[in-house]
Image: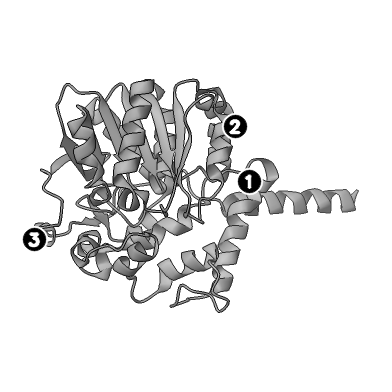
Amino acid sequence: MSIVIALVSLVLVVFIGLYALQAPSTWQRGEVLRTPDSAFENLEDYPFKPHFVTSLGYRIHYLDEGPATGQTVLLLHGQPSWSYLYRHMIPHLVNAGYRVIAPDNVGFGKSDKLVRQSDHSYQMHVDVMSEFMDQLELTDVTLFAQDWGGLIGLRVVAEKPNRFSRIMISNTTLPAMGGFKGLLGYPLFRLSVWREGKVQELSAKNGEFSFPRWVAYARHTEFFDIRDLFQKATKRELSVSALDGYAAPYPSNEYMAAVRRFPSMVASQLRQNQKVMDEFYANWDKPFITVFGTDDVIMKGRDKVWQTLVPGAKGQAHALIEDASHFIQDDKPDDISKQLIQFINNN
């Protein structure tokens, strides 16, 4: 009997420990600062008027271009980008008659920057962007999401399904894992990052990309080079002015809590994401399309998951855009805009 009690106690300790190592699902507003307006003066190809709204205590910056009566297209960015990423797509969409909304997530662009990395959580960003949708009373929305724009945006759709009519994703997914594997996934992920140490160089000795190393690098490197990262994740040669535009929101390290924190949050809601995929997207019958870049090695093949899972993805003109890397909005803005407009017109 004592052995049984000991085994039961051990199992309980293991499960309690696993739950303790999961990311928190609740959050409180953290201390913020704001990038000076002077940092955004004379940005290349970014003539758009700023708009602001308060969502769950955070000031969110967003672009609102095109006719107010036009059908709404919501453009969500990832890490370490901001609405500047969509500067070449927005004119195409506006010329096609759409109202274009492009917000900056908390910690990015002209939105509030959190002082502490630990105040960022996956759940917080989903909650803030969901409230943003309510604040603007957006309806009949077409979502375009890339990178973390998908991790957040696909969850927002599940929270506010009646506000959305169509979804296009590009170079993104929902990191998901259910059951006991889902419990183990985040702790093991954290362990793999810890084993990397406080790395200062992104490239491993063998030259291969390692996601745990990327997470450790983002968190610990003394100098996070925004310009270099964008150029490496984009096939097209970006101008010095464009690279300066991407770096504009972060005049010093104190503004970069989100940039450094986001990679470590990727695996923080594996079980929640699996539930959303199983219970929501497996039943989503509204139009859903994937348009990925052929040269994005990070997200290669993730489009197939959605094409198989989502009922609304059946029969859609899913596409791979040649010579497009992770930041497809910079590599092929004309092509991706055309695909998005065509998707809306066909559905």
322 or 234: nearer the eye? 322
Question: In this view of the protein, can residue 163 be seen by the observer?
Answer: no
Can you identify the residue that label 3 sits on? 38
Which residue shows up at 55% across the image and 51% down it?
22
Of badges 3 and 2, nearer the viewer stands: 2
Q: Earlier in the sequence, mark 3 or mark 1?
A: 3
Question: In this view of the protein, can residue 316 be seen by the observer?
Answer: yes
129 or 39: nearer the eye? 39
- As measured in the structure, the alpha-carbon distance from the residue carrying label 1 to the one carrying label 2 is 21 Å
Point out residue 278 in the picture as x, y percentages from the top left corner: 59, 30
Q: Earlier in the sequence, mark 3 or mark 2?
A: 3
Disc assigned to residue 308: 2
Label 1 SS = helix
233 or 32: nearer the eye? 233
Can you identify the residue that label 1 sits on? 182
Asked if the residue at tag 2 contacts the one at tag 1, i.e. Cβ–Cβ closer than 8 Å, the answer is no
Pointer 3 local density, CA inside 10 Å: few below 14, some 14–19, many at least 20: few
Pointer 2 local density, CA inside 10 Å: few below 14, some 14–19, many at least 20: few
